[in-house]
Each structure stands twice: as C-alpha cells, then as structure tokens.
C-alpha cells in the first residue's frame, strides 16, 4: 500500500496547532496573533481532511469547506477592527500603554 | 522508503519549518512570507490526503485572498516615521514572555501526542474503504444536495461578513 498512515497527518496537525498557539501567546502585534489563529484553524482542517479520506460520504471534507468560509469571514472582520483600532490608538500592540486590551 | 512517504515528509517539513519560522521571526513581513510557504505546504499535504479540491480551494483562498489581506493590513497599520526613509523594512514587532508561550505550546503538543498515542489503536476499527479518486464530483453533489441549506447559509454569512467589514473599516466621524 502506498497510502500515508493517518498518524502522520495527526502528528503534523498537532505540531501546527501548538505552533499556532505559541504564536498567539508569544506575539504582541494583533496581525501576528491573527496569523497564529489562522494556523490553528488550518491544523484542525488538516485533521478533518485526513479523517475524511476513509469516509465515502465525505462529511469531514464538507465540514472543512465551511471551516474555510468561517476562517475567511473572521479574517476580514478582524482586519477591519484592527484598522479601526490603529486609527484610534495609532498602535496595534496588545497590552501597550496606549491601548490596553 | 517509497516516494509517497518521502514527498509527504518533505511537505510536512516545509509546513512545520515555516510555521516555526513564523514563531521565530520578529519581522512581520518575514512572517507573512513564512505563512505563504506554510500554506503551500499545507495544500501539498491536502493533495497527499487525496483531497485535491480542498488543496486548490486552499491555495486560492489563503494564498490569493487572506495573505493579500494580511499584507494590506500590515501596510495600513504600519507606523511610518516621516523623518527617516530606509530601503530595508523595519517592521519589527514586540514579544511578550517567551517562556510561558513556549512551555504552554510544548505541553499542549506533548499532551496531544500522548492522546494520539493512546487512541491510535481505535483508529483502525472505524476506518472504512480508502477513497483514492478525485473528490470533485462527489463534493459538488454533496454540497448542492445534502448540504444545500448550509451552503446557502455560508454564502449569506460571507456576504454579511464582507459588508460588515467594509462598514467597520470606513472612516467614522
């Protein structure tokens, strides 16, 4: 068999999820934090797709399409909010003196 | 080692290394570049999981849409100092405590590995037939028949989110 074992996908996805969590905790810039959240979403997506390999109804893949849509919506709205925060505080660092969130 | 596993390992290495580079760098533009590489590797991993449709959609949406959006966000929220013009970028960002972020994410990763290692035996029971063909026809049929309500709802949700984002980003006086 030439198929890749399921556990490989799960390990890569766990690593991506923890990298995304680390970025989210480590960085102060809001755009950086958003990029970490996108990484975590994509790790979950990889899990769904890897499990839907063995499903003839492809429920995981359909769900990952919706995850993709929700991720894009979250990204656009969050960037618009970041833009307004920048206009208001001239700074988009989390926990900075000018903008305490 | 057969070529399938080898290419999987190359793609997984690309994805994880660029993710780690995103965490490592303090430069926002370098992180955007690393995220581009990470998304390319992820699309390759989707192809390895026999999900060609999702790979193409992922490339279109993330590399074509979200990354451009992030670059615009970086451009519009950058503190430009008018007194100095430099040819290289200086988008350095601040970091909070490195110890806590590293230890929390490492412990989450090890915990996930522990859970996976414990539940690895139960994956073989539920697995059905491996689907190796292209999934485009099946996915289109499923989206327009079984999941048609959710599909339309996702479209309406996307419209509302885009209109709301443009309204939020407007200049309010």
Image (cartoon, helix red, strand yellow):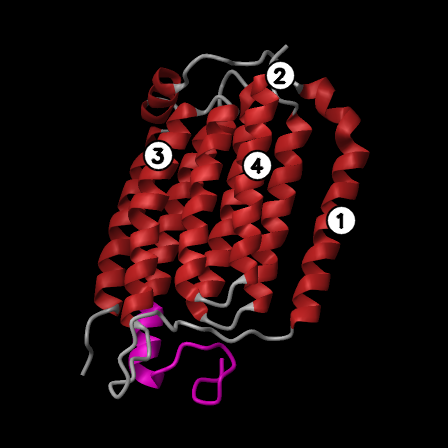
Q: Tell whether A63 sits left or right of B70.
A: right
How packed is label 4: few (under 14 Cα within 10 Å), some, or many (20 or more)?
many
- Tell me, for residue B12, which label it has, or none: 4
Task: Please identify, in this view, whether the residue under mark 2 or under mark 1 is nearer the observer.
Answer: 2
Q: CA distance from mark 1 to mark 4?
A: 18 Å
Assess whether mark 2 and mark 3 are in contact (beta carbons under 8 angstroms).
no
- As helix, strand or loop, the secondary structure at mark 1 comes to helix
Q: Tag 1 or tag 3, which sits nearer the N-term? A: 3
Proximity of marks 3 and 1: CB atoms separated by less than 8 Å: no
Question: Whole-percent x and y of residue B2?
Answer: 62, 16
Q: Nearer the viewer, residue A60 or B91?
A: B91
The answer to which of B47 and A42 lies nearer the viewer is B47
Neighbour tally class for label 1: few under 14, some 14-19, many 20 plus, Cα within 10 Å: some
Span highlighted in magenta in the image: A80-101
Q: Which mark is residue B158?
A: none
Residue at 74% x, 37% y: name it.
Answer: B116
Q: CA distance from mark 4 to mark 3?
A: 19 Å
């Amino acid at each position: 068999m030439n198929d890749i074992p399921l556990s490989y996908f799960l390990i890569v996805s766990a690593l991506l999820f923890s990298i995304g969590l680390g970025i989210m905790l480590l960085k102060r810039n809001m755009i950086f934090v958003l990029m970490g959240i996108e990484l975590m979403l994509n790790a979950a997506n990889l899990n769904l797709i890897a499990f839907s390999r063995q499903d003839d109804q492809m429920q995981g893949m359909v769900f990952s399409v919706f995850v993709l849509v929700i991720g894009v919506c979250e990204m656009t709205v969050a960037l618009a909010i970041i833009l307004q925060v920048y206009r208001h505080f001239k700074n988009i660092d989390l926990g900075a003196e000018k903008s305490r969130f | 080692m057969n070529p399938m596993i080898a290419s999987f390992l190359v793609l997984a290495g690309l994805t994880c290394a660029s993710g780690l580079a995103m965490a490592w760098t303090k430069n926002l533009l370098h992180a955007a570049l690393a995220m581009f590489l990470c998304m390319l590797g992820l699309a390759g991993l989707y192809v390895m999981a026999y999900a060609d449709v999702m790979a193409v959609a992922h490339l279109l949406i993330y590399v074509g849409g979200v990354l451009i959006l992030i670059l615009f966000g970086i451009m519009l929220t950058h503190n430009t100092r008018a007194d100095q013009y430099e040819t290289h970028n200086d988008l350095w960002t601040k970091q909070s405590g490195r110890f806590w972020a590293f230890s929390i994410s490492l412990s989450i990763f090890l915990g996930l590995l522990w859970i996976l290692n414990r539940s690895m035996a139960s994956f073989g029971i539920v697995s059905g037939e491996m689907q190796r063909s292209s999934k485009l026809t099946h996915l289109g049929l499923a989206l327009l028949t079984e999941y048609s309500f959710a599909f339309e709802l996702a479209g309406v949700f996307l419209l509302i989110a885009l209109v709301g984002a443009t309204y939020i980003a407007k200049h309010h006086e």
